[in-house]
Image (cartoon, rainbow, N blue to C red):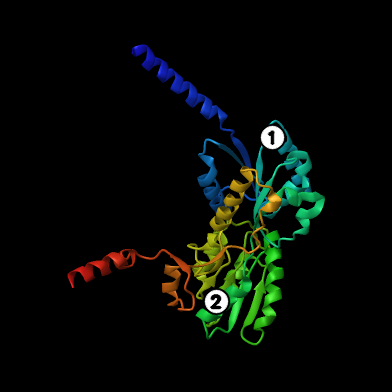
Amino acid sequence: MYFFKKSFFLLSIFFLFELSASVTQKDILLIHSYHRGYKWSDDISKVIDKNFDNRDDVSLTTVYMDTKKVATPLYFDRLFELYDERFRNRGFDLIIAADNNALEFVLRYHEHLFKDLPVVFLGINNFDEAMIYENNMRSYTTGVVEAVDIKKNIDLILNLHPKLKKILIINDHSRTGFAIKRDIFKVLPIYKNRVKFEYVDNIEISNLKNKVINLPKNTAILWVLLFQDKAGKYFSYKESLKEIREIANTPIYGLWDFYLGEGIVGGVLTSATAQAESASIMVEDLLKGINPRKVPILTKSPNKYMFDYYELQKYKIQIPSSIQNYEIINKPFSFYETYKKLVWVTIGTLS
């Protein structure tokens, strides 16, 4: 009997080993356009890590291109040389390209670095399908488009502030800033008889602060980006906003969720987590062997109404009933709101 039990145990171990060995591990490379510590990139990585990093059937490698600080043609050539040396003997199964610079890098060097590998992109501004139809790249590529909604945000600001006379739009000269600038100036003529706009994107932070502190009443700020000012001073995603928030007497609205909790009231925000969750579903499909061409590109950006409770209270802003689906951060705990059903069931039982 002991012999049979021991034999059964050893046989079970053998079959478990064979089963685990039969699981083919997929190797994914996530390429970020920006740097670790940039909240947009960090939020994307949190979702991708959650979905893939601790799985036995997936190995995830993440690299950062750091193109918020340097994005010259020579730099991209040097990155190619570095990645060629680093990944020459790695058998990747799929590439995730986060934001424009990463996607353009992957497309440019696909034949040399990532030949025949499927690509899932996300966070792409001003998406032009032509870029992935060149060299038949649509056969390998699908993903999620990122589009800020300028019109919806201006409509929201005017809805929340019906007596508003002016909106100051703050932007920078980054690549993303230029892309958003084109979208902004397409929309502004719609409002020429409703509100005045002032657009700044090439100004030193000290001069910008003077402008903001002297803004008249019935003014709001639409914060786009400010990573580098006219003097060349570089800011983290929240440093420049913090400097403006500290001296502003007018509400500030934004376009991206990584600014929520850093000083903006809110807005119709482009969400890094929503982008990454949508991209993760596509990654799963491609890992199962589905052809990227059969996975539709998500061209409608998954944006959401989001607000900061502290900022709503500071400016005494009420969210209108016409906005039904939204999120609020920093809201104090409410037993009734959290356990509303339980409260009413209890009341019904006692009555």
Give the side of residue 232 with respect to residue 221, left or right.
right
> Element at badge 1?
helix
User: How many numbered marks are there?
Assistant: 2
Q: Give the quadrant of residue 190.
A: bottom right
Q: Which residue type carries mark 1? A: Phe
Q: Which residue is mark 2?
A: 156
What residue occupies the far bottom of the structure in this picture? 193
Q: Label 1: few (<14), some or many (≥20) within 10 Å?
A: few
Give the side of residue 327 with respect to residue 67, left or right.
left
Residue 87 marker: 1
Residue at figure coordinates x 52%, y 38% from the top left: 55
Give the side of residue 222 with respect to residue 325, left or right.
right
Q: Which residue type carries mark 2? A: Leu
What residue occupies the far right of the structure in this picture? 135
Q: Is residue 72 visible?
A: no
Q: Give the quadrant of residue 312.
A: bottom left
The residue nearer to you, when weighing 302 against 17, is 17
Residue 276 marker: none
Residue at figure coordinates x 52%, y 35% from the top left: 56
> Element at badge 2?
helix
